[in-house]
Amino acid sequence: MAALVARWGAAVDADHALVTLVGARHRVVLPLADDLTFGDLLAMVGWSGGVPGAVLVGGYGGAWLPWGQVAGVPVTDGHLRAVGASLGAGVVAPLVPPACGVHETARLLSYLAASSARQCGPCLFGLPALAGIVTSLAAGHASRADLRQLDRFASEVAGRGACHHPDGAVRMVRSALAVFGAEIDRHSRGWCCGRRPPGVLPVPLRRTP
C-alpha cells in the first residue's frame, strides 16, 4: 500500500479495492475509486496499445466482455454483475489489435488444463478435451460439429469438479463463444487469422521433466 500511495497519492484510499491492469507492456496495480470506469483505467496508465476489442475481467477464470459494452462502466462488482461478470481475482486484461481472442482463449485454456490437480474427472479429462477443441479451432481445423461438442463438454464440466478450477475455465470459454462469435464462425470454416502475438496474460513456461 505504501508503494501505491507514493505513486498515486490522494487517489489511494484504504477502503478502495485494487485491480491489476495487464497487457503486453503493462503490469500495473491500480486503486479503484467508486466511479472509475474501464476507460479510466487505461487513461491512468497512459495506455498505448490501441482501442481494445474486448477485455478479460477477473483473471484466468474470468469472462471476456466486449470493450464497447464496458468502456464507460464503473469497475465494480455491482456493475459487472449486470453484464454477467465479476472482478474475481482483480485482473483486467484488455485485448488489443492485432491479438486474436480465439488464440488467446486457446492459450489460456491450455494453461488451465495443464495446471489442474488432476484429482477429478472434469480436471483430468474435461479441461484437456476443451483445450484441444479450442486449440484446433484457433488453428482453423475445428468444424461446426466440434463447436457443438465444445458446448456439450462445457455443460458436462461446469459445476462437477472437486473445486472451482474447471468452473472458471468453462466461464472463460463460454464468454469467448459469445464475444468472439464472428471470428469463431470464420475459424470453424477453416480460416486462420494467423495473428499470434505474445499473449495478453502472462503464462509460466512449462517445465520439462
Image (cartoon, rainbow, N blue to C red):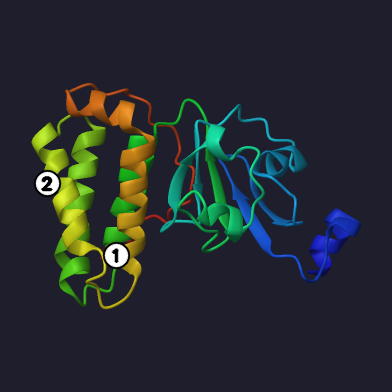
Residue 6 position within the rendered picture, expressed as x and y whole percent measured from the top left: 87, 60
Q: Amino acid at mark 2?
A: Gln
Residue 152 position within the rendered picture, expressed as x and y whole percent measured from the top left: 14, 52
Q: Nearer the viewer, residue 139 or 40?
A: 40
Residue 23 position within the rendered picture, expressed as x and y whole percent measured from the top left: 57, 42
Query: Is residue 199 visible in this depiction of the protein?
Result: yes
Which residue corresponds to mark 1? Answer: 166
| In this rendering, position of residue 30 left or right of residue 91 | right
| Label 2 packing within 10 angstroms: few (<14), some (14-19), many (20+) | some
Residue drawn at 19 percent across, 29 percent down: 188
Up the image or down, 5 lies above or below 45; here it is below
| Label 1 packing within 10 angstroms: few (<14), some (14-19), many (20+) | many
Labels 1 and 2: the sequence-earlier one? 2
Q: Quadrant of residue 161?
A: bottom left
Residue at the extreme right of the image, as rendered? 10
Q: Amino acid at mark 1?
A: Pro
Query: Disc number at residue 180?
Result: none
Residue 51 position within the rendered picture, expressed as x and y whole percent measured from the top left: 59, 28
Residue drawn at 13 percent across, 33 percent down: 144
Which residue corresponds to mark 2? Answer: 149
| In this rendering, position of residue 200 left or right of residue 11 | left
Q: Quadrant of the C terminus?
A: bottom left
Kindly state the secondary structure of the residue where label 2 is placed.
helix
Kindly state the secondary structure of the residue where label 1 is placed.
helix
Residue drawn at 75 percent across, 65 percent down: 16
